[in-house]
């Protein structure tokens, strides 16, 4: 046998001998012996947030995990991640033989597979850097949310603590767009959950780009809306690729953000498409989604990217955005004065037919890079921080607003509200809704008409057919069943006077379906 053949034989033998490793969450029965002084453990802002929400200074989910339990399980596992206070659990990697021993321990309540196949972040490749004159147009991504109205009223997120969970924040000190953060001590705390140190000036620049969509400044123009907020920066993983214990790092960062007083957490990534099946995207299965809901119960608004799977054949909502208490943000572009989902942006519904995304924000944005300069990028990774910055401005205006009241207020401020669908949610959040600005009401755009067979609209001030569609508006419609589930939705450009929306009306009539229409500020609903 040649040396090469012998080596191949040995490698093959080793692969067969080594038992398969799987990620697991080990949940414990109790926290026996654990103690906690909340007034020394939590930052003052965390205690204030809990008091605002009528919560005690701490509860059982805040107490540390029993160290002896962690040590015993870690000794039997191949690898252990961070223990989770919130879930009284530890993420490990183990083979079948090891997990059976662990399951037999008296203090182990149960185990669940963690499915750590990787962690995706929702951005595309950078586009070529623009000329400096490009800065004059930077507010386009902010204007979609009417962010200039916040600026005109001196609102920039001041006093609000925002945590960003990402893959690294290199070069912040090298880009003028972030100097106001360092000069004003607005970066409150940092931690690298991979290398277990406080240096996050490393790794992939995705986190730097995300931070710029919250707090970046290009000359005198703001890239994001929360330029006056304070920040917690957590490096939780490497971009993409298989890696064990990614979920435990994400949970550890959530708990760290809670401890340090975050009112808002921005998340622009999540378990990739290999980690969970689409039927698991119900907001209750993935542990990161369950953690998002628990954060909301602790008074923290989690703002999360919908995902970039809209054009991949499996357009599911990326966890934790599938959780009902997590504000899920899709990517959309401004078109004809309204918003239109970008093709890559994931759309709903969730596996249990809830509406996601909740709102949308621009996905193609200018970003400040990890070195001196700016570029254009796109993805729901950037729609999310734009919305998180918007939320910080709303909180600065109304600091006593509770988490889920804030969630609902942002959803209701959408440019399409009360209309919603599985692609756009309620549209772009609008600052005018929080500043008591009287916007010019839109003219009546259409008249709803019907006969025994079809339902259509007649557009106002439209020619019979507008060949170039120069005067057309975007018309949104959906059909909902008795349970409020959308069975059909679409957006059409109104390029002719008559637009048929429902054919064969009788097939809907006996089942109680309802048609919802929105165009140019005019909303109608009609029982079919």
Image: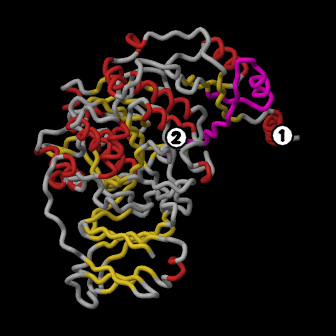
**Residue position for label 1:** 9
How far from the left and from the top, in percent, is residue 140? 21, 56
Q: Nearer the viewer, residue 71 or 453?
A: 453
How far from the left and from the top, in percent, is residue 364? 32, 56
Q: Is residue 34 left or right of residue 459?
A: right
Task: Rate crowding at label 1 as few (under 14), some (14 to 19) or many (20 or more) other CA atoms within 10 Å.
Answer: few
Can you say whether 81 is above or below 473 in the image? above
Residue 97 lies in the magenta stretch: yes
Residue 128 seen anywhere in this rendered image of the structure: no
Residue 329 lies in the magenta stretch: no
Can you say whether 527 is above or below 107 in the image? below
**Residue position for label 2:** 289
Closer to viewer: mark 2 or mark 1 = 2
Residue 219 seen anywhere in this rendered image of the structure: yes
Q: Quadrant of the C terminus?
A: bottom left
Q: Nearer the viewer, residue 13 or 144?
A: 144
How far from the left and from the top, in percent, is residue 469? 26, 82
Q: Is residue 438 left or right of residue 351?
A: left
Q: Which residues are magenta?
A: 91-120
Q: Tell me the number on the disc at residue 123.
A: none
Which secondary structure lies at badge 1?
helix
Q: Which residue is at a point 39% across and 71% down the rendered structure image?
A: 477
Q: Quadrant of residue 525?
A: bottom left
**Marks 2 and 1, how far apart in space?**
44 Å
Q: Residue furthest right?
A: 1
Q: Which residue is at a point 48% across and 33% down the rendered structure image?
A: 294
Q: Quadrant of the N terminus?
A: top right
Q: Quadrant of residue 458?
A: bottom left
Can you say whether 241 is above or below 444 in the image? above
Can you say whether 381 is above or below 446 in the image? above
């Amino acid at each position: 046998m040649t040396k090469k053949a012998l080596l191949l034989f040995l490698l093959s033998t080793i692969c067969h001998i080594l038992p398969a490793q799987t990620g697991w969450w080990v949940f414990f029965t109790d926290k026996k012996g654990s103690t906690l002084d909340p007034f020394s453990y939590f930052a003052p802002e965390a205690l204030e947030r809990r008091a605002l929400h009528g919560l005690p200074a701490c509860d059982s989910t805040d107490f540390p995990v029993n160290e002896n339990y962690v040590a015993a399980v870690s000794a039997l596992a191949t690898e252990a991640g961070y223990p989770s206070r919130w879930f009284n659990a530890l993420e490990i990697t183990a083979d079948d033989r090891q997990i059976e021993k662990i399951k037999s321990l008296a203090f182990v309540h149960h185990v669940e597979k963690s499915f750590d196949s990787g962690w995706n972040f929702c951005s595309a490749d950078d586009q070529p850097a623009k000329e400096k004159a490009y800065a004059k147009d930077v507010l386009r991504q902010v204007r979609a949310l009417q962010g200039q109205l916040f600026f005109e009223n001196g609102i920039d997120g001041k006093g609000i603590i925002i945590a960003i969970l990402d893959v690294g924040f290199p070069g912040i000190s090298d880009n003028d767009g972030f100097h106001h953060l360092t000069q004003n001590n607005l970066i409150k705390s940092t931690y690298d959950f991979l290398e277990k140190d406080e240096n996050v000036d490393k790794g992939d620049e995705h986190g730097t780009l995300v931070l710029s969509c919250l707090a970046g400044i290009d000359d005198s123009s703001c890239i994001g809306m929360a330029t006056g907020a304070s920040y917690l920066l957590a490096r939780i993983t490497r971009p993409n690729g298989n890696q064990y214990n990614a979920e435990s790092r994400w949970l550890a960062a959530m708990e760290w953000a809670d401890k340090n007083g975050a009112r808002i957490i921005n998340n622009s990534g999540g378990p990739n498409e290999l980690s969970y099946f689409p039927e698991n995207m119900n907001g209750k299965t993935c542990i990161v989604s369950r953690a998002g809901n628990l954060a909301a119960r602790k008074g923290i608004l989690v703002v999360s990217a919908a995902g970039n799977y809209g054009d991949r054949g499996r357009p599911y909502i990326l966890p934790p955005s599938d959780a009902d208490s997590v504000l899920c943000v899709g990517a959309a572009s401004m078109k004809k004065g309204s918003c239109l989902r970008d093709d890559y942006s994931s759309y709903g519904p969730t596996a249990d037919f809830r509406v996601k995304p909740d709102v949308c924000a621009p996905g193609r944005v200018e970003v400040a890079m990890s070195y001196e300069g700016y570029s254009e990028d796109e993805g729901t990774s950037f729609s999310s921080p734009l919305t998180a910055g918007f939320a910080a401005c709303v909180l600065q205006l109304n600091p006593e607003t509770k988490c889920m009241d804030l969630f609902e207020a942002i959803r209701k401020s959408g440019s399409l509200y009360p209309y919603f669908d599985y692609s756009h949610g309620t549209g772009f959040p609008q600052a005018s809704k929080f500043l008591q600005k009287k916007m010019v009401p839109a003219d009546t755009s259409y008249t709803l008409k019907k006969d025994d067979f079809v339902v259509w609209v007649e557009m106002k001030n439209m020619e019979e057919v507008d060949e170039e569609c120069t005067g057309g508006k975007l018309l949104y419609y959906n059909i909902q069943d008795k349970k409020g589930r959308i069975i059909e939705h679409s957006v059409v450009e109104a390029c002719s006077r008559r637009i048929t929306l429902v054919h064969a009306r009788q097939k809907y009539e006996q089942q109680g379906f309802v048609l919802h229409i929105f165009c140019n500020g005019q909303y109608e609903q009609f029982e079919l």
